[in-house]
Image (cartoon, rainbow, N blue to C red):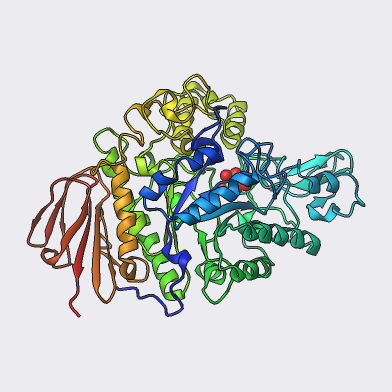
Amino acid sequence: MKIVPSEKIQPVWWRETSVYQIYPASFKDENGDGFGDLQGILSKLDYLKGLNVESIWLSPIYPSPLKDMGYDVSNYKEIDSRYGSLQDINVLAKELHKRGMKLVMDLVLNHTSDQHDWFKESRSSKTNSKRDWYIWRPAKYNKDGKRLPPNNWRSYFDTSAWEWDETTQEYFLHLWAPEQPDINWESPELRKAIYDIVRYWLDRGVDGFRLDVINMISKNQEFPDALVTDDRYDYQMGYKYYANGPRIHEYLKELGQILHEYNAFSVGEMPHVEDTDEVLRVVGADRRELTMIFQFDLVSLDLVPGKHKYVEGTWKLSDLKKSVKKWQSIYLTGGGWNASFIENHDQPRTVSRYLSDSPEHRAHSSKLMALFIVFQGGTPFVYQGQELALANIPRDWSISEYVDVETQNFWKLFMSGNPTQEEIQKTMDIVNMRARDNGRTPMHWDSSPNGGFCPKDVKPWMRVTEDFNEWNASSQVGKPDSVYSFWSASLGYRKAMKDAVVYGSFELLSEEDPSIVAFVRESNSTVLAVILNFTDKSVSYECPLQIGGFQVLLNNYEDLVIKENVIHLNPYQGVLFKKSLST
Ligand code: GLC
């Protein structure tokens, strides 16, 4: 069935743009300290322009103790000196705007660093004026008089979500690390301070924000215990009580009001939300909350629902197709908007995770993903290195090379259970496949030592994956059949045919086909068909379209065999077809 966009979907820049996410620590080190920086980003703007991306989103670059790589902010109005200065950000905004591109910053508004002045004040005494800017609760005691946290919630980093504070004899809430206390949006003064930060960056010329876990800012104020879903853990996931909590829309409307005033872009990270009406309450065009959200279906396909991320699971193409159809329909007919993504700094590399990173199929896999991400309805997101087919960390790296707090905390907890050698190997396989570290290794710029990320005699903050010799930017830019050129061409076609790709209808074909993802995008003048073989086998696909009348715009193989309406597809082959409609 053809899904036709609602009239509420009117042309606006943030629908038309495409976004490239930069993880600044790992992008490009220009000052030679082994850590990426803003000068490094400035030196690569033409690389980005050549890729045809139109907006750049920077993961957080504010001053931070880096307990969670910058998602622990100690000052929202400055730039961490490791990355550069406010002056550098001004230059970056100017240089991007000069190229017709936009700048998106990452705002972390669910929690701060414990080194933020607000928290230092808040924890100084129970009567401090900022005490209620954070979430403080008294202890509970069991019948033996043992002190316990206020409830059983588990943090995302595998500990209790509450930390005891000796000075003021209360617990504070932290859904992530103890060094990331959650802020209390119930306080009107706190909210005022947040809105002031939002305006501060918009006034500096920033074009919008990615809003970190923004659906967690309103908590059920009773703080009830979470249901026990995994009895191997002392603590349980409590998101039922804080994901899209009671006052979320009131807060998002206040925030959205400011964003709307500046015609700003906003993408809110929204885990745990499956209720489609609830999503539309956030992104509905007439709601003025956020312009789009990151919904988690496609990055959870291989996870076991309700279980820990490091529990083994498999994924099904039918689930991927169901999810695509569902969200295209909800967003287009409901007057919302999709954020089309499958990689970011919290996810492994898709060629390794869902497709193939074998030498034979790695390039095909990444190119297939380009067609899948870029030509769906919505604003597409490309994560640094995705455009070069960067892959996961090799299996033989030891756990000590994984530097993320999430991985390290999980591993500590796992090892404390005295696992057998066999269990260790098995769990390491899963960690290697899923750890956030996979997406955070430094970029591959060329085949020189350290992949050109930092000078050769400098130790990068995180180990560079050794396949940079072969898989790097300089071997791909300017080469017509490279992965980079394929992504660039895909994004270029999206720009050139926005009537169909941005504003056109969407139809999923052959829903029951076990190997193929096929969809059509259509405007009054253009029909585009995207046909993707997601398997490692050759497939003969009987296409319901009169495909003979179409022209091939992009194909990730040199050959393409079509007989009548049967398309013979090689493993991971993906093709973009076009037909013009005479008017
Ligand atoms: C988001 C970020 C992730 C971070 C967490 C806490 O999920 O993407 O990297 O650890 O929020 O800020």
Residue 146, image x, y percentages? 84, 39
| 561 displayed left or right of 360 | left
Q: Quadrant of residue 470?
A: top left
Q: Residue at x 46, y 31 (%)?
A: 453
Residue 557, image x, y percentages? 19, 45
Q: Residue furthest left?
A: 563
The answer to whether residue 318 is visible is: no
Q: Quadrant of residue 66?
A: top right
Q: Residue at x 66, y 40 (%)?
A: 80
Q: How many marks?
A: 0
Q: Residue furthest right?
A: 127
Residue 362, image x, y percentages? 29, 38
Q: Quadrant of residue 34?
A: top right
Viewer-closest of 52 and 181: 52
| 2 displayed left or right of 344 | left
| 151 displayed left or right of 475 | right
| 77 over 511 or under it: above or below | above
| 408 over 421 or under it: above or below | below
Q: Residue at x 32, y 40 (%)?
A: 477
Q: Can you say which quadrant of the picture contains the C terminus?
A: bottom left
Residue 366, image x, y percentages? 32, 44
The answer to whether residue 122 is visible is: yes
| 181 displayed left or right of 507 | right
Q: Can you say which quadrant of the picture contains the N terminus?
A: bottom left
Viewer-closest of 392 and 156: 392
